[in-house]
Amino acid sequence: VEKREPQPQDVAPGPAHLPRGRHGLPRELVAENQRERLIAGTIEAVSEHGFNETTIAAIVKAAGVSRPTLYVHFANKEACFAAAYEASFEYVRASMLAAAVRTEEWTERVRAGLAGLLAEFVADPDLARFFLTSPAGAGDEIAERHHEAMGNIVSALTAEAPRGAGEISPERAQILAGGISRLLERRLNAGEGGELRELLPALTELVVAAFLGTKKALALAGPG
Amino acid sequence: MELRRLGRDPALSGGATPAGRVRAARPERADPRGALGYPRPVAGKRVDLPIAPRGRHGLPADIVSAHQRQRLLAATTELVAERGYHGASIDQILKAARVGYVAFYELFPGKEECFIAAFEEIVAEAREEILDAVAADDPWPAQLCTALRTLLARIAAEPSDARLVLGEVHAAGPAALGRYEELLEEAAAALRAGRAYGKDPGRAAVSLEEANVGGVVWLLHQRLVGGRLEGVEDLFGELASVLLEPYVGAAKARKLISAAVPAEI
């Protein structure tokens, strides 16, 4: 799957440092750049240490900004995490939808969307660990937000299911989100980032089965 | 009762309870869902565990130590449920359990190991209850329904246990997470038995059961972090249909589930 052009709302993988000293750059531009670097730094630090073991020192080091600068933008670690989470969510969702939009047929769209998701996580394992693994240990508020966001991703992925497929309940959507997360996390934990792509048939089958039943899903998306 | 009041509670700071005798529940503990009140009865088993008298008492050391361990596990469960893994300190756990530092460190190297012991005990009790409830000669789908109903009832009855095993485990470090992974593997293996029952067992992706177990704990976790565990038994129908459908089809799954749920009205 080819990588799409980056969008302005994306998490920049590594925002560049601005020149030191007097540079005559507008204040807003500097602030924007600092904020982006802090978000990228949070993702890097948390994906390495986990939420609870991540310190403000680790975030500012990864971001390449000073500690006072961090506090200009965020009140505490939780606020850094929340901002980084929202940026990641927007980015992951947009990547998935951009990949899914290329095809018309529903099962193929689901497959393409999942492929886009996998490609993003393969390209950026830090982002994958941050987005999929860290929210569960980052407090109830973040965990709740993650459930809601993953439910949103599942709805976006499965929008316009064919007639006769019916709608799935919010609970069923959550079960699906949990199934997808579990398979991704297991591969990530095993340190097999590159092999995430191999999950595509199983994930497609899982999603299609939630709407059409396992038998039909196997016929449409199963092996062979 | 608030935890910080524990030290001043005359009922707790009073004399030791004679070993072997269970103290009667105090009236202010009548609300089982109230904030932390130690020692809170858990699953009707760790009822007000006796504390050895001070000084020379002639009680065998291993019995005293086993009681201390039980009190520590109960206190850990309650404190972690109330304050989160990182919010609960060893000091608070010791105070609530009425166990000293030396005794604690003779039993556990640290908080993480104490947490894992509490995790293991909760899981062992739940496993035992589920295995007791399941009739070995029932067909597989009926066994699954019984196991699921037993699990949900237990989660609704023991929200602190559920919070430790399904929630705080994510914050308690890699060793605890490893135990959690093993638990999910065990559940997935139990689900895989459905393949022997189903008519077209072999074709679904090998990861189906892992995904379905992941889906179940995910939904339970959502209820947990949203503070909505009390109605968790209502999820039985939705969960059972997801777990049974791959092996028996949607229509048969519906029949089995309505047979497993006593009809309302």
Image (cartoon, coloured by chain):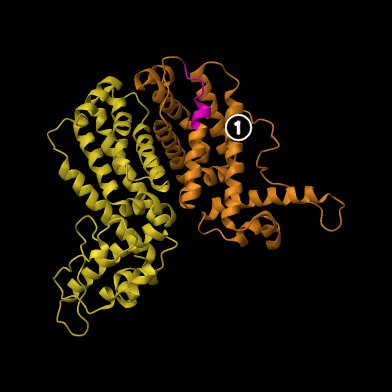
Residue B109, visible in the rendered structure? no
- Magenta stretch containing residue A185, yes or no? no
Q: Nearer the viewer, residue B173 or A149?
A: A149
Task: Identify the residue at image location x=50%, y=29%.
Answer: A155
**Residue B182 to residue A61: above or below:** above
Q: Give left or right: position of B152 versus A37.
A: left
Q: Secondary structure at mark 1?
A: helix
Question: Farthest residue in the bottom direction?
Answer: B56
Residue B168, visible in the rendered structure? yes
Give x and y (percent) for residue A221: 43, 20
Q: Nearer the viewer, residue B148 or B24?
A: B24
Q: Give left or right: position of A97 versus B134.
A: right
Give x and y (percent) for residue A172: 39, 31
Q: Which chain is yellow?
A: B
Task: Identify the residue at image location x=45%, y=29%.
Answer: A203
Q: Which chain is orange?
A: A
Task: Identify the residue at image location x=55%, y=38%.
Answer: A121
Q: Nearer the viewer, residue B79 or B262?
A: B262
**Residue B188 to residue B50: above or below:** above
Give x and y (percent) for residue B245: 30, 26
**Residue B216 to residue B79: above or below:** above
The chain identifier of the residue carrying mark 1 reads A
Q: Give left or right: position of A200 versus B114.
A: right
Q: Nearer the viewer, residue B77 or A7?
A: B77
Type of amino acid at the residue the image marks with label 1: Ser
Kindly indicate the quadrant of the structure image that contains residue B66: bottom left
Task: Please give the range of residues in magenta.
Answer: A154-162
List the residue tagged with mark 1: A95
Kindly indicate the quadrant of the structure image that contains residue B49: bottom left
Q: Give left or right: position of A184 versus B120.
A: right
